[in-house]
Amino acid sequence: MDHKFRGTPYTVGIEEELMLVNAETLELEQGIETILADLGEDFEDKVKPELMQSVLEIATAPHRNVAAAGEELRSLRRTVSEAAERHGMTIAASGTHQTAHWEEQLIVDRPRYHELVGELGYIARRELIFGTHVHVGVAGPNKAIYVADGIRKHLPLLLALSANSPLWRGAVTGIMSARTPVFRGFPRVGIPPHYGSWEIYSGRVKLMMEAGAIPDYTFLWFDVRPHPKLGTVEVRVFDQQTRVESTIALSAMVVALVHRYSTLFDDRAALVEVPTELIDDNKVRAALRGMDGMLIDFPRPEQCAATEMATHLLEELREHAEELGCENEMEGVRSLIEGGTGAHRQLEVLERTGDVKELIRATCEATRV
């Protein structure tokens, strides 16, 4: 398989999936084509459609550091917010829209999305969810596989830190990341296999393509994956963050993790394979309780508080963040540990106001930069 794992390491690109909301009713608006027409060709690589017409994706270029990527991300949020306002809409950022029903959403008129709905039907139609993806440049295909394999065990903790979807279809679910079980219905999602080498990974992708299961590797929607065409490792486990500062902080943590495992690869350190079923059990815990729960720590294994695990990981990654110059951005993770995640803030607003519309309005306001 062709790849581009030969570029500058530790470049970072960030993608956010945002909601288009009617400024008056606060319901989702089928407005992506209006936004794309408004912004024109200058933004065709930076503002993109997703499966549903009420969703837009913003994507930064690859940057040499987190600060620069964060600056562009803020600029893109402002750009799409201003475009939305010109057409009676606003943008909002969360893992789910708090009241929307997937049955009322229109599919974007693109062949890929029509084919996806034609193949998966209900599974695809109900995917009214929003996530954040972080790409980090890695030099070398075997190193990329090693890094992705290493990050696997951290995915539940990353999800817990990002949990920001406690409501679904107007109801409090009792789940901090309701987005997670919705997306779980898709094939080829969640915790990926431990591949071990580029040869094994590319061979298994080839097998799936030859079997007609997938047209190419981009249809493997795992929570972390190598992205050969971009030369990156992509972390996809996050709920979309309302506050842009949270997205930037989590991105810095991902870059530091990539640096850590790249260093271990260069030192020829053996990587212990953590069983998928244990990581997946952890992920369910993270979706249910977020940072309020207990997670299984590896390789002991034993249960400990998610807050304790996150604090420990921050300390482990500090030297890596300092070497990359993103320690200030990564420090924002501490506010998610000590001050609560997006899910906590949503539930607090709902408890204080008793009004879901006030919660949606507060989400829109907190999304602005």
Image (cartoon, grey):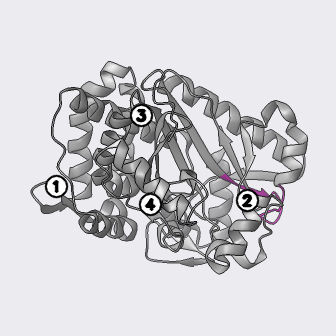
Q: Earlier in the sequence, mark 4 or mark 2?
A: 2
Q: Which residue is mark 4?
A: 344
Mark toward the viewer: 4 or 1: 1
Q: Residues within 10 Å of mark 1 (few under 14, many from 20)?
A: few
The answer to which quarter of the image holds residue 210 is bottom right
The image shows residue 325 at horizontal and vertical percentages of 38, 20
Q: Which residue is mark 2?
A: 112
Mark toward the viewer: 1 or 2: 2
Disc 2 is placed on an element classified as helix
Mark toward the viewer: 3 or 1: 1
Q: Which residues are magenta?
A: 18-31
The answer to which quarter of the image holds residue 82 is top right
Q: Which residue is mark 3?
A: 252
The image shows residue 141 at horizontal and vertical percentages of 39, 35
Amino acid carrying mark 2 in the image:
Arg
For residue 109, the mark is none
Q: In this view, which residue lies farthest toward the front?
A: 210
Q: Which residue is mark 1?
A: 298
